[in-house]
Image (cartoon, rainbow, N blue to C red):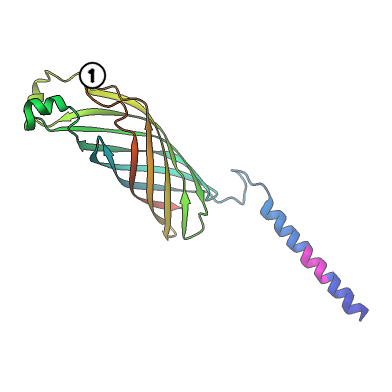
Amino acid sequence: MKTITLLLILGLGVLFASAQESMEQKDEITTIFSKNKSNGGYGAINFSWTEIEQKSAFLVGARGSWIIDHSFAIGLGGCGFINNLDHHDWMDNAWNDSFDNSLAGGYGGIYLEPIIGPRLPVHLSFPVLIGAGGIARVANNDYWDNRWMYDNNHEDAFFIVEPAIELEFNMTRFMRMAGTLSYRFTSDITMENTDPEVLRGLSAGLIFKFGKF
């Protein structure tokens, strides 16, 4: 009986020690260059819709990121946009349909992306873009061939910070699809007859990621 009791105590001791060692391994602080870290990367394309001056606009973008231990990505990317906008009301009132005005441009920069629960089939990520871009007026008509009104008042550069939330679906080991919602914070746009906050607003769209996650 004493032998059985002793064996049970020893067995429980081994199990306790094993469990404690396992917990210590899980709690161990890991670094970027730790041998047990798993790094990867991905390339992505995205398609988004937004409103600029109460008119629909379409954005197409791409980015590439390095993933650190499944849970944080850093990379570069950007997008371009274009929209038919009647943002020069005085011209529309004067010539009606003589001008077909659009605002076009693009922006890009660095992406910082925390990823929450990356091993789950459905999870969240919170990318933030920090960068710069440019915007200009585009008019598709013969009047602009003479350039009698085109000058620096119809183009501008800006800084942008665009935080987003992405609901990601692990489609395969090498592909993820996500619905994304973001907000553009920009510096004031200095263009003739254009709202300084013209680019600020929400965007919604889809993003497709391909790589090692």
> Foreground: 183 or 75?
183
Q: Is residue 50 magenta?
A: no
The majority secondary structure of the magenta stretch comes to helix
Give the quarter of the image for residue 130.
top left
Binning the other alpha carbons within 10 Å of mark 1 as few (below 14), some (14 to 19) or many (20 upward) gives few
Give the quarter of the image for residue 128.
top left
Name of the residue lying farthest toward the bottom: 1
Can you see residue 213? Answer: no
Q: Is residue 15 magenta?
A: yes
In the picture, measured across the screen, residue 206 lies left or right of residue 13, that is left
Residue at 12% x, 25% y is 91
Determine the secondary structure under disc 1. helix
* Residue type marked 1: Asn
> Which quadrant holds the N terminus?
bottom right
Residue at 21% x, 37% y is 83
Give the quarter of the image for residue 94.
top left
> Foreground: 36 or 10?
10
Q: How many marks?
A: 1
Mark 1 = which residue?
152
Q: Give the vertical position of 148 relative to 35 (above or below).
A: above
Measured as percent of width and height from the top left, residue 132 is found at: 37, 29
> Foreground: 69 or 84?
84
In the picture, measured across the screen, residue 1 lies left or right of residue 144, that is right
Measured as percent of width and height from the top left, residue 160 is found at: 38, 31
Q: Give the vertical position of 164 relative to 153 (above or below).
A: below
Measured as percent of width and height from the top left, residue 186 is found at: 37, 30
Residue at 24% x, 26% y is 194
The magenta segment: 11-16
In the picture, measured across the screen, residue 138 lies left or right of residue 197, that is left
